[in-house]
Image (cartoon, helix red, strand yellow):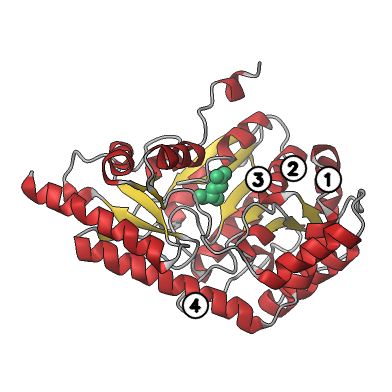
Amino acid sequence: MNSLFASLPTTVFETMSRLAREHDAVNLGQGFPDDPGPLDVREKAAEAVLNGWNQYPPMMGVPELRRAVSEHYRDWQGLDLDPDTEVMVTSGATEAIAGALLALIEPGDEVVLFQPLYDAYLPLVQRAGGIPRLVRLVPPHWRLTEEALGEAFTPRTRLVLFNNPHNPTGRVFGRDELELLARHCVRSDAVLISDEVWEHVIFDGLTHQSVLSLPGMRERAVKIGSAGKIFGMTGWKVGFVCAAPNLMRALSKAHQFLTFTTPPSLQHAVAYGLGKDPDWFMGTRAGLQRSRDRLAAGLAGIGFSVLPSSGTYFLNVDLAPLGANVRDEEFCRSLVAEFGVAAIPVSAFYAQDAVESVIRFCFAKTDATLDRAIERLEAVRSRALAG
Ligand code: GLN
Protein backbone atom coordinates (compact mmCIF):
# COMPACT_ATOMS: atom_id res chain seq x y z
CA MET A 1 0.00 0.00 0.00
CA ASN A 2 1.05 3.57 -0.40
CA SER A 3 2.16 4.63 3.08
CA LEU A 4 0.87 8.19 2.70
CA PHE A 5 -2.70 7.19 1.88
CA ALA A 6 -2.73 4.10 4.10
CA SER A 7 -2.00 6.25 7.14
CA LEU A 8 -4.43 9.11 6.35
CA PRO A 9 -7.39 9.53 8.69
CA THR A 10 -10.94 9.78 7.32
CA THR A 11 -11.68 13.41 6.43
CA VAL A 12 -12.96 15.60 9.25
CA PHE A 13 -16.07 16.37 7.16
CA GLU A 14 -17.08 12.72 6.93
CA THR A 15 -16.26 12.14 10.59
CA MET A 16 -18.29 15.10 11.83
CA SER A 17 -21.26 14.27 9.57
CA ARG A 18 -21.22 10.70 10.95
CA LEU A 19 -21.14 12.01 14.55
CA ALA A 20 -23.95 14.44 13.69
CA ARG A 21 -26.11 11.53 12.48
CA GLU A 22 -25.25 9.39 15.53
CA HIS A 23 -26.18 12.16 17.96
CA ASP A 24 -29.10 13.50 15.93
CA ALA A 25 -27.29 16.84 15.91
CA VAL A 26 -27.89 19.96 13.83
CA ASN A 27 -25.11 19.59 11.26
CA LEU A 28 -23.29 22.88 10.76
CA GLY A 29 -20.08 20.97 10.04
CA GLN A 30 -19.65 19.75 6.46
CA GLY A 31 -20.43 22.58 4.05
CA PHE A 32 -23.60 21.93 2.10
CA PRO A 33 -26.80 23.97 1.84
CA ASP A 34 -30.24 22.95 3.12
CA ASP A 35 -31.71 24.45 -0.06
CA PRO A 36 -32.17 21.86 -2.86
CA GLY A 37 -30.79 24.19 -5.57
CA PRO A 38 -32.50 26.10 -8.41
CA LEU A 39 -35.46 24.14 -9.80
CA ASP A 40 -34.96 25.24 -13.42
CA VAL A 41 -31.36 24.00 -13.42
CA ARG A 42 -32.43 20.67 -11.90
CA GLU A 43 -35.20 20.38 -14.48
CA LYS A 44 -32.70 20.90 -17.29
CA ALA A 45 -30.59 18.07 -15.88
CA ALA A 46 -33.63 15.77 -15.58
CA GLU A 47 -34.72 16.59 -19.11
CA ALA A 48 -31.19 15.90 -20.38
CA VAL A 49 -31.08 12.54 -18.59
CA LEU A 50 -34.44 11.51 -20.07
CA ASN A 51 -34.09 12.80 -23.60
CA GLY A 52 -30.45 13.69 -24.12
CA TRP A 53 -27.17 12.00 -24.89
CA ASN A 54 -26.01 9.76 -22.04
CA GLN A 55 -22.88 8.31 -23.65
CA TYR A 56 -19.37 9.77 -23.32
CA PRO A 57 -19.35 13.47 -24.07
CA PRO A 58 -16.17 15.10 -25.46
CA MET A 59 -13.24 14.68 -23.09
CA MET A 60 -12.75 18.45 -22.66
CA GLY A 61 -16.44 19.02 -21.86
CA VAL A 62 -19.52 19.67 -24.00
CA PRO A 63 -18.97 22.71 -26.26
CA GLU A 64 -22.08 24.47 -24.88
CA LEU A 65 -20.67 24.38 -21.36
CA ARG A 66 -17.18 25.47 -22.36
CA ARG A 67 -18.72 28.42 -24.19
CA ALA A 68 -20.97 29.20 -21.23
CA VAL A 69 -17.98 29.16 -18.82
CA SER A 70 -16.06 31.53 -21.09
CA GLU A 71 -19.04 33.91 -21.40
CA HIS A 72 -19.83 33.74 -17.70
CA TYR A 73 -16.29 34.68 -16.68
CA ARG A 74 -16.21 37.41 -19.32
CA ASP A 75 -19.39 38.95 -17.94
CA TRP A 76 -18.65 38.50 -14.25
CA GLN A 77 -14.88 38.76 -14.00
CA GLY A 78 -13.75 40.49 -17.20
CA LEU A 79 -11.75 37.45 -18.38
CA ASP A 80 -11.09 36.62 -21.99
CA LEU A 81 -10.95 32.81 -22.31
CA ASP A 82 -10.97 30.85 -25.55
CA PRO A 83 -13.58 28.11 -24.98
CA ASP A 84 -11.78 25.74 -27.36
CA THR A 85 -8.28 25.90 -25.92
CA GLU A 86 -8.54 27.44 -22.45
CA VAL A 87 -11.55 25.83 -20.74
CA MET A 88 -11.95 22.22 -19.57
CA VAL A 89 -14.76 20.54 -17.63
CA THR A 90 -13.86 18.14 -14.80
CA SER A 91 -15.77 15.96 -12.35
CA GLY A 92 -15.67 18.56 -9.63
CA ALA A 93 -12.97 20.94 -8.44
CA THR A 94 -11.29 18.17 -6.47
CA GLU A 95 -10.54 16.30 -9.69
CA ALA A 96 -9.34 19.56 -11.23
CA ILE A 97 -6.95 20.16 -8.33
CA ALA A 98 -5.67 16.56 -8.25
CA GLY A 99 -5.18 16.61 -12.03
CA ALA A 100 -3.38 19.94 -11.96
CA LEU A 101 -0.98 18.70 -9.29
CA LEU A 102 -0.29 15.45 -11.15
CA ALA A 103 0.22 17.30 -14.41
CA LEU A 104 2.38 20.16 -13.15
CA ILE A 105 4.61 18.78 -10.37
CA GLU A 106 7.92 17.07 -11.03
CA PRO A 107 9.12 15.03 -8.02
CA GLY A 108 11.16 17.29 -5.76
CA ASP A 109 9.47 20.52 -6.84
CA GLU A 110 8.59 22.85 -4.00
CA VAL A 111 4.92 23.77 -3.68
CA VAL A 112 3.76 26.74 -1.61
CA LEU A 113 0.49 26.18 0.32
CA PHE A 114 -1.44 28.27 2.82
CA GLN A 115 -2.56 27.02 6.24
CA PRO A 116 -5.31 26.58 7.24
CA LEU A 117 -5.65 24.49 4.09
CA TYR A 118 -8.43 22.46 2.63
CA ASP A 119 -7.66 18.94 3.79
CA ALA A 120 -7.22 17.35 0.34
CA TYR A 121 -4.41 19.66 -0.75
CA LEU A 122 -1.45 18.38 1.20
CA PRO A 123 -1.75 14.62 0.56
CA LEU A 124 -2.34 15.30 -3.13
CA VAL A 125 0.75 17.52 -3.35
CA GLN A 126 2.85 14.93 -1.51
CA ARG A 127 1.55 12.00 -3.58
CA ALA A 128 2.47 13.92 -6.72
CA GLY A 129 6.03 14.21 -5.38
CA GLY A 130 5.88 17.86 -4.33
CA ILE A 131 7.73 19.22 -1.31
CA PRO A 132 5.27 21.39 0.65
CA ARG A 133 6.27 24.84 1.90
CA LEU A 134 3.59 26.08 4.24
CA VAL A 135 2.59 29.68 4.81
CA ARG A 136 0.79 29.97 8.15
CA LEU A 137 -2.19 32.34 8.31
CA VAL A 138 -3.45 33.34 11.73
CA PRO A 139 -6.68 34.76 13.16
CA PRO A 140 -8.31 37.20 13.31
CA HIS A 141 -7.15 38.67 9.95
CA TRP A 142 -5.54 35.69 8.18
CA ARG A 143 -3.50 38.12 6.03
CA LEU A 144 -0.88 37.26 3.42
CA THR A 145 2.29 39.11 4.36
CA GLU A 146 5.50 39.90 2.51
CA GLU A 147 7.44 38.33 5.34
CA ALA A 148 5.58 34.98 5.30
CA LEU A 149 5.69 34.72 1.50
CA GLY A 150 9.38 35.65 1.47
CA GLU A 151 10.10 32.71 3.79
CA ALA A 152 8.04 30.18 1.84
CA PHE A 153 9.19 30.96 -1.71
CA THR A 154 12.64 29.69 -2.69
CA PRO A 155 14.43 29.32 -6.03
CA ARG A 156 13.01 25.75 -6.12
CA THR A 157 9.36 26.90 -5.90
CA ARG A 158 7.59 25.59 -9.01
CA LEU A 159 3.96 25.68 -7.95
CA VAL A 160 1.60 27.51 -5.61
CA LEU A 161 -1.78 26.15 -4.52
CA PHE A 162 -4.01 28.99 -3.43
CA ASN A 163 -7.66 29.33 -2.44
CA ASN A 164 -9.72 32.53 -2.64
CA PRO A 165 -12.34 33.14 -1.20
CA HIS A 166 -10.76 31.02 1.48
CA ASN A 167 -12.18 27.96 3.20
CA PRO A 168 -12.25 27.62 6.23
CA THR A 169 -11.59 31.25 7.18
CA GLY A 170 -14.21 32.99 5.03
CA ARG A 171 -11.51 35.45 4.03
CA VAL A 172 -11.63 37.25 0.66
CA PHE A 173 -8.05 38.32 -0.03
CA GLY A 174 -7.49 41.94 -0.97
CA ARG A 175 -6.06 43.22 -4.23
CA ASP A 176 -2.81 44.16 -2.46
CA GLU A 177 -2.37 40.61 -1.14
CA LEU A 178 -3.17 39.07 -4.54
CA GLU A 179 -0.65 41.30 -6.27
CA LEU A 180 1.96 40.44 -3.67
CA LEU A 181 1.37 36.75 -4.36
CA ALA A 182 1.53 37.32 -8.13
CA ARG A 183 4.86 39.13 -7.77
CA HIS A 184 6.33 36.18 -5.89
CA CYS A 185 5.05 33.72 -8.53
CA VAL A 186 6.57 35.76 -11.35
CA ARG A 187 9.87 36.18 -9.49
CA SER A 188 10.15 32.41 -8.84
CA ASP A 189 8.79 31.48 -12.26
CA ALA A 190 6.11 29.43 -10.47
CA VAL A 191 2.67 28.39 -11.71
CA LEU A 192 -0.28 29.41 -9.52
CA ILE A 193 -3.17 26.98 -9.13
CA SER A 194 -6.09 28.99 -7.81
CA ASP A 195 -9.06 27.23 -6.26
CA GLU A 196 -11.80 29.84 -6.77
CA VAL A 197 -14.79 27.58 -6.10
CA TRP A 198 -16.34 30.16 -3.74
CA GLU A 199 -16.12 32.99 -6.32
CA HIS A 200 -19.89 33.59 -6.29
CA VAL A 201 -20.30 33.14 -2.55
CA ILE A 202 -19.06 36.56 -1.47
CA PHE A 203 -20.76 39.24 0.56
CA ASP A 204 -20.90 42.88 1.56
CA GLY A 205 -20.76 44.07 -2.06
CA LEU A 206 -17.33 42.57 -2.74
CA THR A 207 -16.48 41.45 -6.28
CA HIS A 208 -14.38 38.41 -7.02
CA GLN A 209 -10.97 38.99 -8.57
CA SER A 210 -9.57 36.00 -10.40
CA VAL A 211 -5.83 35.41 -10.34
CA LEU A 212 -6.02 35.32 -14.15
CA SER A 213 -6.58 39.08 -14.06
CA LEU A 214 -3.42 39.80 -12.05
CA PRO A 215 -0.32 41.28 -13.66
CA GLY A 216 1.85 38.54 -15.19
CA MET A 217 -0.55 35.73 -14.31
CA ARG A 218 -2.58 35.14 -17.49
CA GLU A 219 0.01 32.65 -18.81
CA ARG A 220 1.02 31.13 -15.49
CA ALA A 221 -2.20 30.61 -13.53
CA VAL A 222 -4.78 27.83 -13.46
CA LYS A 223 -8.22 28.95 -12.32
CA ILE A 224 -10.54 26.30 -10.90
CA GLY A 225 -14.30 26.78 -10.47
CA SER A 226 -17.22 24.63 -9.33
CA ALA A 227 -20.85 24.43 -10.45
CA GLY A 228 -21.61 22.62 -7.19
CA LYS A 229 -20.71 25.77 -5.25
CA ILE A 230 -22.18 28.26 -7.75
CA PHE A 231 -25.60 26.56 -7.72
CA GLY A 232 -25.45 25.20 -4.18
CA MET A 233 -25.66 21.56 -5.31
CA THR A 234 -22.48 20.13 -3.86
CA GLY A 235 -23.13 16.58 -5.04
CA TRP A 236 -23.05 17.51 -8.72
CA LYS A 237 -19.28 17.49 -9.00
CA VAL A 238 -18.97 19.57 -12.15
CA GLY A 239 -15.80 21.65 -12.14
CA PHE A 240 -14.11 24.00 -14.62
CA VAL A 241 -10.44 24.54 -15.28
CA CYS A 242 -9.28 27.68 -17.08
CA ALA A 243 -5.68 28.15 -18.19
CA ALA A 244 -3.57 29.28 -21.13
CA PRO A 245 -3.24 26.63 -23.90
CA ASN A 246 0.31 25.73 -22.96
CA LEU A 247 -0.72 24.69 -19.44
CA MET A 248 -4.04 23.25 -20.61
CA ARG A 249 -2.30 20.70 -22.83
CA ALA A 250 -0.71 19.05 -19.76
CA LEU A 251 -3.83 19.50 -17.59
CA SER A 252 -6.00 17.73 -20.17
CA LYS A 253 -3.66 14.71 -20.16
CA ALA A 254 -4.19 14.23 -16.42
CA HIS A 255 -7.97 14.65 -16.81
CA GLN A 256 -8.19 12.12 -19.63
CA PHE A 257 -6.81 9.39 -17.37
CA LEU A 258 -8.49 10.39 -14.11
CA THR A 259 -12.17 10.62 -15.04
CA PHE A 260 -12.02 11.28 -18.80
CA THR A 261 -15.49 12.85 -18.87
CA THR A 262 -18.24 14.29 -16.68
CA PRO A 263 -21.98 13.39 -16.94
CA PRO A 264 -23.28 15.22 -20.04
CA SER A 265 -26.74 15.83 -18.56
CA LEU A 266 -25.25 17.83 -15.69
CA GLN A 267 -22.96 19.70 -18.08
CA HIS A 268 -25.94 20.83 -20.18
CA ALA A 269 -27.82 21.94 -17.07
CA VAL A 270 -24.79 23.89 -15.81
CA ALA A 271 -24.36 25.53 -19.23
CA TYR A 272 -27.96 26.75 -18.93
CA GLY A 273 -27.47 27.82 -15.30
CA LEU A 274 -24.37 29.92 -15.94
CA GLY A 275 -26.45 32.08 -18.26
CA LYS A 276 -29.10 32.80 -15.63
CA ASP A 277 -30.05 36.38 -14.94
CA PRO A 278 -27.54 38.29 -12.75
CA ASP A 279 -30.42 38.87 -10.31
CA TRP A 280 -30.44 35.18 -9.49
CA PHE A 281 -26.75 35.20 -8.56
CA MET A 282 -27.07 38.40 -6.55
CA GLY A 283 -30.23 37.15 -4.85
CA THR A 284 -28.47 33.93 -3.84
CA ARG A 285 -25.62 35.96 -2.37
CA ALA A 286 -28.03 38.17 -0.48
CA GLY A 287 -29.82 35.13 0.95
CA LEU A 288 -26.57 33.58 2.15
CA GLN A 289 -25.44 36.91 3.57
CA ARG A 290 -28.67 37.07 5.60
CA SER A 291 -27.99 33.56 6.89
CA ARG A 292 -24.44 34.53 7.79
CA ASP A 293 -25.72 37.52 9.73
CA ARG A 294 -28.40 35.47 11.47
CA LEU A 295 -25.92 32.88 12.70
CA ALA A 296 -23.31 35.52 13.59
CA ALA A 297 -25.87 37.47 15.65
CA GLY A 298 -27.07 34.30 17.38
CA LEU A 299 -23.53 33.20 18.26
CA ALA A 300 -22.52 36.67 19.42
CA GLY A 301 -25.69 36.84 21.53
CA ILE A 302 -24.58 33.70 23.36
CA GLY A 303 -21.21 35.30 23.98
CA PHE A 304 -19.08 33.59 21.32
CA SER A 305 -16.34 35.65 19.72
CA VAL A 306 -17.33 35.62 16.03
CA LEU A 307 -14.59 36.25 13.43
CA PRO A 308 -15.46 38.19 10.27
CA SER A 309 -16.50 36.21 7.16
CA SER A 310 -16.77 37.84 3.72
CA GLY A 311 -17.27 34.70 1.65
CA THR A 312 -17.89 30.90 1.55
CA TYR A 313 -20.61 29.11 3.54
CA PHE A 314 -18.62 29.47 6.74
CA LEU A 315 -18.00 31.62 9.72
CA ASN A 316 -15.60 30.99 12.56
CA VAL A 317 -15.67 31.43 16.26
CA ASP A 318 -12.59 32.10 18.34
CA LEU A 319 -12.66 30.01 21.50
CA ALA A 320 -9.72 31.82 23.09
CA PRO A 321 -11.95 34.08 25.23
CA LEU A 322 -13.47 30.93 26.76
CA GLY A 323 -10.14 30.03 28.36
CA ALA A 324 -6.64 29.07 27.36
CA ASN A 325 -7.19 25.33 27.70
CA VAL A 326 -10.27 25.04 25.47
CA ARG A 327 -9.10 23.12 22.38
CA ASP A 328 -11.13 23.14 19.19
CA GLU A 329 -11.25 19.40 18.60
CA GLU A 330 -12.39 18.51 22.11
CA PHE A 331 -14.83 21.39 22.04
CA CYS A 332 -16.38 20.15 18.76
CA ARG A 333 -16.65 16.61 20.11
CA SER A 334 -18.50 17.81 23.17
CA LEU A 335 -20.66 20.19 21.09
CA VAL A 336 -21.91 17.37 18.89
CA ALA A 337 -22.26 14.72 21.62
CA GLU A 338 -23.63 16.79 24.51
CA PHE A 339 -25.26 19.79 22.86
CA GLY A 340 -26.33 18.33 19.51
CA VAL A 341 -24.58 20.77 17.16
CA ALA A 342 -21.84 19.73 14.73
CA ALA A 343 -19.04 22.16 13.79
CA ILE A 344 -15.55 21.66 12.35
CA PRO A 345 -12.34 22.19 14.38
CA VAL A 346 -10.10 24.47 12.30
CA SER A 347 -6.93 22.71 13.57
CA ALA A 348 -7.88 19.94 11.10
CA PHE A 349 -6.84 22.35 8.33
CA TYR A 350 -3.27 22.70 9.62
CA ALA A 351 -0.47 20.21 8.96
CA GLN A 352 1.79 21.76 11.60
CA ASP A 353 1.74 24.51 14.24
CA ALA A 354 -2.05 24.33 14.28
CA VAL A 355 -4.21 27.15 15.54
CA GLU A 356 -6.37 25.18 18.02
CA SER A 357 -8.75 27.85 19.22
CA VAL A 358 -11.07 28.29 16.23
CA ILE A 359 -14.13 26.33 15.12
CA ARG A 360 -16.04 26.63 11.85
CA PHE A 361 -19.82 26.73 11.41
CA CYS A 362 -21.68 26.38 8.09
CA PHE A 363 -24.49 28.93 7.75
CA ALA A 364 -25.89 27.82 4.35
CA LYS A 365 -28.99 26.58 6.15
CA THR A 366 -32.65 27.50 6.61
CA ASP A 367 -33.50 29.99 9.34
CA ALA A 368 -35.17 27.15 11.23
CA THR A 369 -31.97 25.06 11.17
CA LEU A 370 -29.83 28.01 12.29
CA ASP A 371 -32.28 28.93 15.05
CA ARG A 372 -32.37 25.33 16.30
CA ALA A 373 -28.56 25.32 16.46
CA ILE A 374 -28.51 28.60 18.38
CA GLU A 375 -31.15 27.35 20.81
CA ARG A 376 -29.03 24.31 21.54
CA LEU A 377 -25.85 26.37 21.85
CA GLU A 378 -27.51 28.53 24.52
CA ALA A 379 -26.99 25.53 26.79
CA VAL A 380 -23.23 25.94 26.36
CA ARG A 381 -23.47 29.32 28.04
CA SER A 382 -25.65 28.01 30.87
CA ARG A 383 -23.15 25.20 31.41
CA ALA A 384 -20.21 27.63 31.40
CA LEU A 385 -22.00 29.92 33.87
CA ALA A 386 -22.86 26.98 36.13
CA GLY A 387 -19.28 25.63 35.93
N1 GLN B 1 -16.06 21.62 0.97
C1 GLN B 1 -16.77 21.06 2.07
C2 GLN B 1 -16.45 21.78 3.36
O1 GLN B 1 -15.48 22.49 3.45
C3 GLN B 1 -16.47 19.61 2.35
C4 GLN B 1 -16.29 18.70 1.20
C5 GLN B 1 -16.08 17.29 1.67
O2 GLN B 1 -16.77 16.83 2.56
N2 GLN B 1 -15.10 16.65 1.14
O3 GLN B 1 -17.16 21.58 4.30
Query: Which numbered circle lies on residue 318?
Result: none
First along the sequence among labels 2 and 3: 2
Q: Is residue 131 above or below residue 179?
A: above
Tell me where residue 322 appears, x and y as whole percent: 17, 49
Give whichever of discs 1 and 3 has the lower sequence position. Answer: 3
Label 1, label 4: how far apart the Cα atoms are: 39 Å
Dots 2, 3 in contact, CB < 8 A: no
For disc 2, the marked residue is: 99
Mark 1 or mark 4, earlier in chain: 1
Q: Cβ–Cβ below 8 Å for labels 1 and 4? A: no
Question: Residue at label 1?
Answer: 250
Question: At 33% from the left edge and 57% from the top edge, which residue is drawn?
Answer: 373
Circle 4 — which element?
helix
| Residue indicated by mark 4 | 286
Counting other residues with Cα less than 10 Å from the Cα at mark 1, is it few (<14), some (14-19), or many (20 or more)? Answer: some
Q: Amino acid at mark 4?
A: Ala
Residue 95 vertical position relative to residue 53 in the rendered view, above or below: above
In three-dimensional space, the C-alpha distance between marks 2 and 3, rounded to whole angstroms, equals 14 Å
Q: Nearer the viewer, mark 2 or mark 3?
A: 2
Q: Nearer the viewer, mark 4 or mark 3?
A: 4
The Cα atoms of the two marked residues, 4 and 3, are separated by 35 Å
Q: In the image, 244: left or right of 319?
A: right
Left or right: residue 200 compared with residue 364: right
Check disc 3 and report the residue beneath it.
159
Between the residue at mark 1 and the residue at mark 3, the CA separation in whole angstroms equals 14 Å
Distance CA(mark 4)–CA(mark 2): 33 Å
- Assign a secondary structure to mark 2: helix
Left or right position of 33 against 354? right
Corner quadrant of residue 323: top left
Query: What residue is shown at x 71% (from left), y 72% (from top)?
Result: 40
- Give the foreground label among 1 and 3: 1
Measuring 45% from the left and 57% from the top, which residue is drawn there? 144
